[in-house]
Amino acid sequence: MNARLRLHALLVPVLLFLCACGGGARPTNAPIKLGFVVKQPEEPWFQLEWAFADVAQKELGFTLVKIGASDGERVLGAIDNLAAQGASGFVICTPDVRLGPAIAAKAKARNMKLVAVDDRFVGADGQPMQDVHYLGISARKIGEDVGRALHAEMSKRPWSHEKLGVCVVTFDELDTARERIQGATAVLRELGVPAERIFTAPEKAPEIPAALDAVNVLLTRHPDVERWLVCGMNDNSVLGAVRALEGRGFGADRVIAIGINGTDCIDELRKPATGFFGSMLLSAKEHGHRTVAMLHAWCKDGVEPPLDTRTTGILITRANFEQVLKEQGVAR
Ligand code: GLA
């Protein structure tokens, strides 16, 4: 046998073995490769998740592939791309939770393990896909904390319920968004804010321009309101509302707005008081580091993560944010 034939004789069985194992196959001693796919790579929240996933990559010695995917086509392409690179699994915050069944099926077909982060997959029956491993926030509880903090701050001011409006920026496509908002409004009602003073502004996307448009429509409808409390699913939704209110002359003396994430409002908190009073800081570390660490243990040692993991939040305001961000490893 000449040298070329000998090489073929060696390579063919290896290639056949790799094909039989599907996309997730990797040579035994090569480092594990994992993907981390996010829906909005431009949002500081997702950049921080990636930064903490990078820390896990260094600590645990796997290879991380980060991919931004803002629609279904890009998500499915990203999974194919990861499979072609021999990734064993991926963490994903999908741009559309209804892609859940397609993502889960593709991961299975490609022999890759999967952890959903932030936005939980929804099945064909409209229910959360409980068989897909998920790590997300305790949305209802964090929403309730927003409601309590809004009320506590209002109670420090000479504000009555008369001429008060609660601006609730809604985004019904996501369970986590609905739960956050329901938690906040339920607590405000329990604390005595009349239901008829609570108004919703549905945004088309959880982004500043979309929230600004939605809240402008709401403000046009309620010219009688003199003081506003504001909540929404995340910092950008609430920042959009604050900008719309500023456009109509409502500043820090007549607006108390509290966001969620705590990562997308740092520049805002560094400004002198605006209507944006504070935010519930979520744990980008848990979401970025813990998800890939769990996935790594699962792919490497077969340790299956819990199906449902929830994380908590801490209120940050201008008074404490520098300190808390430092303690949480989010800012220096
Ligand atoms: C959703 C939001 C993000 C962030 C995460 C937290 O994905 O779009 O801004 O709040 O949830 O889990």
Image (cartoon, helix red, strand yellow):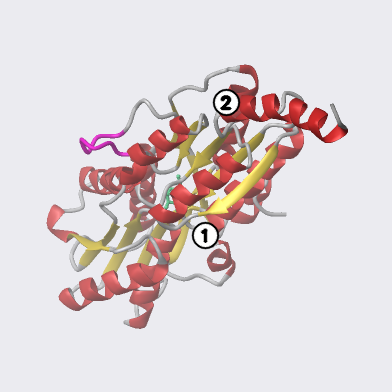
Q: Is residue 223 visible?
A: no
Classified by dominant secondary structure, the portion drawn in magenta counts as loop
Look at label 2 and name its amino acid: Cys
Q: Is residue 162 above or below residue 330?
A: below
Horizontal side of 1 relative to 34 (left or right) equals: right
- The kind of secondary structure element at disc 1 is loop
Q: Is residue 175 visible?
A: yes
Give the amino acid type for the residue marked by disc 1 in the picture: Glu
Locate residue 211, reporting x and y percent. Answer: 34, 67
Magenta stretch in the rendered image: 121-128
Work out whether residue 248 or residue 181 is closer to the camera in this orientation and state it: 181
Left or right: 196 in relation to 285:
left
Residue 154: give x, y in percent of width and height. 34, 57
Residue at image location 40% in from the left, 43% down from the top: 119
Crowding near pointer 1: few (<14 within 10 Å), some, many (20+)? some
Expressed as whole percent of the image width and height from the top left, the position of residue 11 reads: 73, 30
Q: Nearer the viewer, residue 5 or 7?
A: 5
Which residue sits at x=12%, y=58%? 196
Look at mark 2 in the image and give the residue it sits on: 21
Which quadrant, please, contains the N terminus? top right
107 over 14 or under it: above or below: below
**Residue 26 pos. (x, y %):** 67, 30
Label 2 or label 1, whichever comes before in sequence order:
2
Element at label 2: helix
- Residue 186's place in the image compared with 46, above or below, is above
Magenta stretch containing residue 124, yes or no? yes
Q: Is mark 1 within 8 Å of ligand 1?
A: yes
Residue in view at x 44 percent, y 48 percent = 76
* Nearer to us: label 2 or label 1: 2
Label drawn at residue 43: 1
